[in-house]
Amino acid sequence: MDTSVVKSFGIRCPIVDSTRTKFALKIDPTTKDTTRIDLKLPVLQALFGGGSIQNHGHIDEEGKKSWEKRGR
């Protein structure tokens, strides 16, 4: 195994924010197949608990976080 090269990768939230239904993508580590998992929030939790399902952002290959404030 060659460990002399530093690998870089990005990390993304698996929640996809579509206009109709929010869903998560599950990726099988061995086969790389993707499965769509629909995410549903109970009505009472959404109305009275203030719950929501949303994408939380990403960290790119350079380590920059999408949720941090950007400079002017």
Image: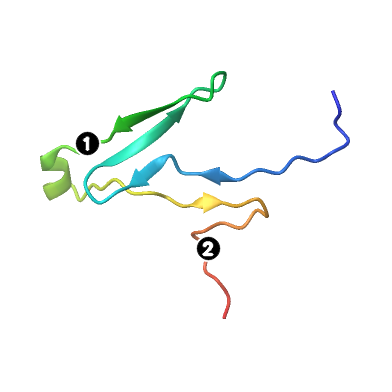
Q: Is residue 42 left or right of residue 29?
A: left
Instruction: Name the one closer to the observer, 51 or 28.
Output: 28
Q: State the SS at label 2.
A: loop
Quadrant for residue 44, please give it. top left
Q: Is residue 55 left or right of residue 72?
A: left
- Residue 9 lies, with reference to residue 69, above or below; the image says above
Quadrant for residue 6, please give it. top right
Residue at the spot 23% in from the left edge and 47% down from the top edge: 51
Determine the residue located farthest toward the bottom in the rendered image: 72
Where is residue 66 shown, x and y percent of the image? Answer: 52, 58
Q: Is residue 18 left or right of residue 67?
A: left
Which disc, if any, is residue 40?
1
Q: State the SS at label 1.
A: loop
Instruction: Identify the image quadrant of the C terminus.
Output: bottom right
Where is residue 45 shown, x and y percent of the image? Answer: 16, 42
* Residue placed under numbered mark 2 in the picture: 68
- Residue type (three-letter) at the residue carrying disc 2: Glu
Where is residue 37 shown, x and y percent of the image? Answer: 32, 30
In three-dimensional space, the C-alpha distance between marks 2 and 1, rounded to whole angstroms, equals 28 Å
Q: Is residue 15 left or right of residue 27?
A: left
> Contact, CB < 8 Å: mark 2 with mark 1?
no
Q: How is the image coloured?
A: rainbow
- Compare marks 2 and 1 and give the one earlier in the sequence: 1
- Residue type (three-letter) at the residue carrying disc 1: Lys
Residue at the spot 43% in from the left edge and 29% down from the top edge: 26
